[in-house]
């Protein structure tokens, strides 16, 4: 994980931001596919999910929050797994929990929420392809299994379905705002890094 971008975005430029977030004096960070971030200072972190999955982690007493945006279920057999752990659901969860552990924060002290995993294929192809390739469903399945392996039960979930989601995560409070997307809204560009924001 590397240092996060610290520049604030123009609040009015963050499309779809809930009105109650407009006046918050927070850094605004944008999380892309394959990225993860641990924020020790409160930030408002936005991301857009289709079949990808995000898990948010929040430690109430230190106001530390973490989130990732993973596109594939498992790092097993992946040549780039060590270099891009937040691209994979299982490795991303392990990476973020490891970052919390290095700060003395145990997994069972975190409030965890699970998002994403939509099946966003063309409606005509949906029934034919779901049994062959439901990456979103598999992402959710692996996220739940990996969290369970660490003794974590998500406090809440906003998952599956057939529409993408835009998330806004307040890392200082653990609150998450979700907006379902229209099918015409474009996906985000890809990036494959993890970020660690400690200051």
Image (cartoon, helix red, strand yellow):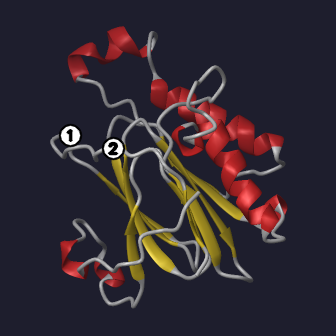
The reply, left or right, for residue 91 in relation to residue 151 is left
Residue at x 55%, y 27% (from the top left corner):
138
Give the residue pinned by disc 1.
Answer: 183
- Towards the viewer: 127 or 148: 148
Q: Position of residue 146 (x, y in %)?
A: 73, 39
Label located before the other in sequence (2 or 1): 2
Give the residue pinned by disc 2.
Answer: 164
Residue 26 lies, with reference to residue 48, above or below; the image says below
Q: Position of residue 168 (x, y in %)?
A: 41, 66
CA–CA distance in space, label 2 to label 1 = 7 Å
Q: Position of residue 188 (x, y in %)?
A: 28, 47
> Which class describes the residues within 10 Å of circle 2: few (<14), some (14-19), or many (20+)?
many
> Which class describes the residues within 10 Å of circle 1: few (<14), some (14-19), or many (20+)?
some
Are dots 2 and 1 in contact, CB under 8 Å? Answer: yes
Residue 20 lies, with reference to residue 70, above or below; the image says below
Residue 126 lies, with reference to residue 44, above or below; the image says above
Indicate the quadrant containing the N terminus: top left, top right, bottom left or bottom right.
bottom right
Q: Secondary structure at mark 2?
A: loop
Q: Secondary structure at mark 1?
A: loop
Q: Position of residue 97 (x, y in %)?
A: 73, 56
> Quadrant of the rendered structure where residue 167 is?
bottom left
Q: Residue furthest left?
A: 184
> Quadrant of the rendered structure where residue 121 is?
top left
């Amino acid at each position: 994980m590397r240092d996060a971008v610290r520049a604030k975005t123009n609040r009015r430029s963050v499309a779809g931001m809930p009105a109650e977030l407009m006046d918050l004096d927070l850094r605004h960070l944008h999380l892309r596919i394959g990225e993860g971030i641990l924020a020790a200072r409160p930030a408002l972190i936005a991301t857009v999910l289709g079949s990808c999955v995000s898990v948010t982690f929040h430690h109430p007493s230190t106001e530390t929050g973490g989130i990732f945006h993973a596109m594939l279920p498992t790092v097993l057999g992946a040549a780039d797994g060590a270099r891009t752990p937040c691209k994979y659901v299982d490795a991303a969860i392990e990476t973020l929990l490891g970052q919390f552990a290095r700060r003395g924060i145990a997994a069972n002290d975190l409030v965890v929420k699970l998002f994403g995993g939509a099946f966003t294929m063309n409606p005509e192809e949906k029934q034919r392809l779901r049994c062959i390739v439901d990456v979103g469903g598999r992402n959710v399945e692996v996220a739940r299994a990996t969290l369970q392996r660490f003794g974590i039960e998500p406090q809440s979930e906003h998952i599956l379905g057939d529409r993408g989601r835009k998330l806004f995560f307040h890392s200082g409070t653990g609150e998450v705002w979700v907006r379902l997307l229209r099918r015409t809204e474009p996906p985000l560009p890809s990036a494959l890094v993890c970020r660690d924001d400690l200051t």
